[in-house]
Amino acid sequence: MKTNDQFQDAVSAYESVRAAKQELKEESKLICEEIAKAQDELAGLQTSYLPVQDLKEGIIQLLCCSGENFEMNSIRPAISALATNGKWGLGFPMEEYGKPINYKNMESAIAGNLPQFAACQIFTPDKSTYFDDRVFLGLLFKAIEPTIRNIMEKMQPEEFGYDHINPSEIGPGLEERRQMIQAIKAKIQALEEKKGAIAGKLSALGE
């Protein structure tokens, strides 16, 4: 009789485990569907077009960012090269490269006895044949921003390419979209973590 009770307990336990597995699988399936839906929504937000005013704002931000990047990636390294003797060309003592310019060489450069042009190309380094407009963005962006905005306000949507798309392809505004995308990404991450926890439970149950 005791053996039969143990058998029934084992069957009951097995059924409970199987039911738990099935429940976890169904929950995982629903989560996967939620993730897929969120990813589709995210893809739609990322590929649809901006309203024209938000496109203009995006252009302003792009130009500003370009100026900041130019300052960081071009102007600062060029100033550093000037300060560490990397601008004087052939014939300059190799042992001085990488060190701060000393007084004698500084005075010599100021006096024009070292190649000032190459040394002072800190806004358009290594570009002696043309002027790089990003210097304006790096140094004068706040001054020229109103002018750029004024120019764009006079432009028609067609000049921004809106005559080549369907109005239905236009999505939320720039800042609203950024917030929506962050929210969706956070949701996907939370769902992925939940899915992972379920996978762990199924693994513990021998699935």
Image (spheres, rainbow, N blue to C red):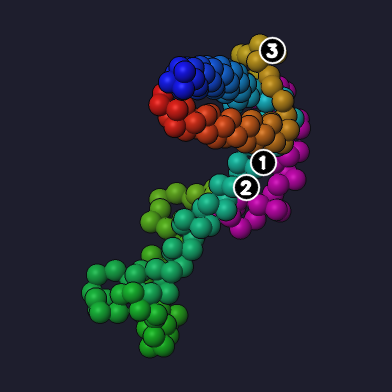
Under circle 3, the secondary element is helix
- Circle 3 Cα neighbour tier, 10 Å, few/some/many (<14 / 14–19 / ≥20): few
Q: Pointer 1: what residue?
A: 60
Q: Is residue 133 left or right of residue 174?
A: left
User: Could you tell me which residue is drawn at 72 percent across and 25 percent down?
Assistant: 172
As shown in the figure, which amino acid type bears the numbered disc 2?
A: Cys
Under circle 1, the secondary element is helix
User: Could you tell me which residue is drawn at 35 percent across and 79 percent down?
Assistant: 99
* Residue 114 appears anywhere in the view: no
| Residue closest to the far front | 1
Q: Is residue 84 left or right of residue 163?
A: left
- Specify the segment rendered in magenta: 135-160
- Circle 1 Cα neighbour tier, 10 Å, few/some/many (<14 / 14–19 / ≥20): some
- Compare residues 113 and 78 and report the one nearer the observer: 78
Is residue 141 shown in magenta? yes
Q: Name which of mark 3 and mark 1 comes first in the sequence.
A: 1
- Circle 2 Cα neighbour tier, 10 Å, few/some/many (<14 / 14–19 / ≥20): some
Q: Pointer 2: what residue?
A: 64
Under circle 2, the secondary element is helix
Majority SS type along the magenta span: helix
- Compare residues 24 and 166 and report the one nearer the observer: 24
Q: Pointer 3: what residue?
A: 168
